[in-house]
Image (cartoon, rainbow, N blue to C red):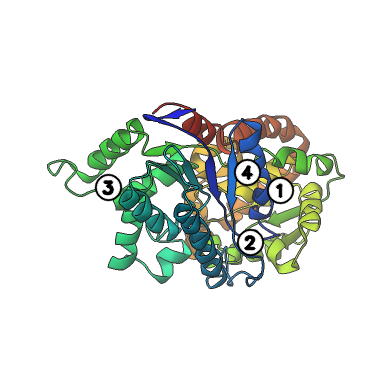
Amino acid sequence: MKIGKLVVNKVFLVDLEAVDTRYTGEWKTHFPELLRNNNIEVVLIDGPTDIPAATTPGAFLNFGGTNVYKAAQVEKFSRMFCSGDVKDGDYFLFTDAWHPGIINLKYMASLLNIKIKIGALWHAGSYDPADFLGRIIGDAPWVRHTEKALFSAIDHNYFATDFHIKLFADTMCPTAYPHSWQAATRTAAWITDMMKQGKIIQTGWPMEYMSDTLAPYKNMKKRELILFPHRVAPEKQVDIFRDLAGLLPQYEFVVCQDKHLTKQEYHTLLGEAKIVFSASLQETLGIGCYEGALVDALPMVPDRLSYTEMYYDNFKYPSIDTQDWDHYCANRQQLCYNIMNAMTFYEHRVPQLRKQATDLVANFFSCTNIINTIKSAK
């Protein structure tokens, strides 16, 4: 396999710690298996299992535990440099671009003159004001410079949606690129250049397994159930969902995270639900609504964020309806009508939903572009 002027010897897969209730649990086995099935030699760089298991409230990871895990990974691949196990042509693939080890890796490879390539998946960052990092840390100089350094050190920056690429570029695009242009034009030109160079790559996430995982739940008996599949965090606006529950008592509304469900219990609820609802202000992909679509639960999502490019119009409602609490209060009657209409005509919408699910799998939940990038000359 060639990449640039290099021949890819093997891929060092620097994974995320597995959280059983999140997709990272499946990624632990699926991602390396997927690469091997594509004739790519994989060396897994994982961390210890004895880290705090609970996530920080409202977040995706435990903020202390994730650094214990990443620090152990840095030690592991640093020792591989010391022992001569890392060679010209090797490829390091980080399943989370927000990894301090990328700087350590670039440092060693540069000083030792070992010609490696680095690829990494961007999930979120401080450049998103609605994300945890954006809300808590904001545009502090240290975090801005860190993310720019990570982007620069990474050869292939992978993003799941065009929305995420634009969000990233709005902050990361150099202001002098070129200096005479207006911001929007400058950002668009920078994205085009970065994509032509292979520096930015839009690709689905490695979730090919999900269709098979959820297949046993697809033909379950449906009930008048509406799910909120997201984390309970400010940017997900769970209060809107809870208010709708009070307005529509004829339906059952469930906030999944309130139930402390196992993965199987969560999938069972998905299989029984007719609707999965989102009012998110931050979403660079949106796995919960995709999971619902796979088991014939109608997504009801705002026409913003990643949802705009991912979903057919029939599954989107106007963004302004849940833009914030005040706009929701002004438009909740229409939202209630949309929910009742979806419930009443549920069976009529299923055929289009199944086509929607097929498109989601092909365009956003299959990592073909990552595999092709590793295997192809650039």
Label 1, label 2: how far apart the Cα atoms are = 12 Å
Where 140 sits versus 128, above or below?
A: below
Can you tell which quarter of the image residue 311 is in? top right
Q: Amino acid at mark 3?
A: Cys
In terms of sequence position, does the residue under pointer 3 or pointer 4 come before the other?
4
Label 1, label 3: how far apart the Cα atoms are = 38 Å
In terms of sequence position, does the residue under pointer 4 or pointer 2 come before the other?
4
In terms of sequence position, does the residue under pointer 3 or pointer 2 come before the other?
3
Contact check, label 4 and label 2, Cβ < 8 Å: no
In terms of sequence position, does the residue under pointer 1 or pointer 3 come before the other?
3
| Residue behind mark 1 | 275
Q: Is residue 233 left or right of residue 340?
A: left
| Residue behind mark 3 | 173
In terms of sequence position, does the residue under pointer 1 or pointer 2 come before the other?
2
Q: Is residue 101 left or right of residue 144?
A: right
* Disc number for residue 241: 2
Residue 52 percent coordinates (x, y): 63, 72
Q: Is residue 273 left or right of residue 118?
A: right
| Residue behind mark 4 | 31
* Disc number for residue 129: none
Identify the residue at image location x=27%, y=47%.
Answer: 173
Q: Amino acid at mark 1?
A: Ile
Total tally of numbered discs in the picture: 4
Near mark 2 (Cα within 10 A), the count class, few <14, some 14-19 or many ≥20, is: many
SS at circle 3? loop
Residue 190 percent coordinates (x, y): 27, 39
SS at circle 2? helix
SS at circle 1? strand
Q: Nearer the viewer, residue 92 or 287?
A: 92
Can you tell which quarter of the image residue 347 is in? top right
Q: Nearer the viewer, residue 311 or 231?
A: 231
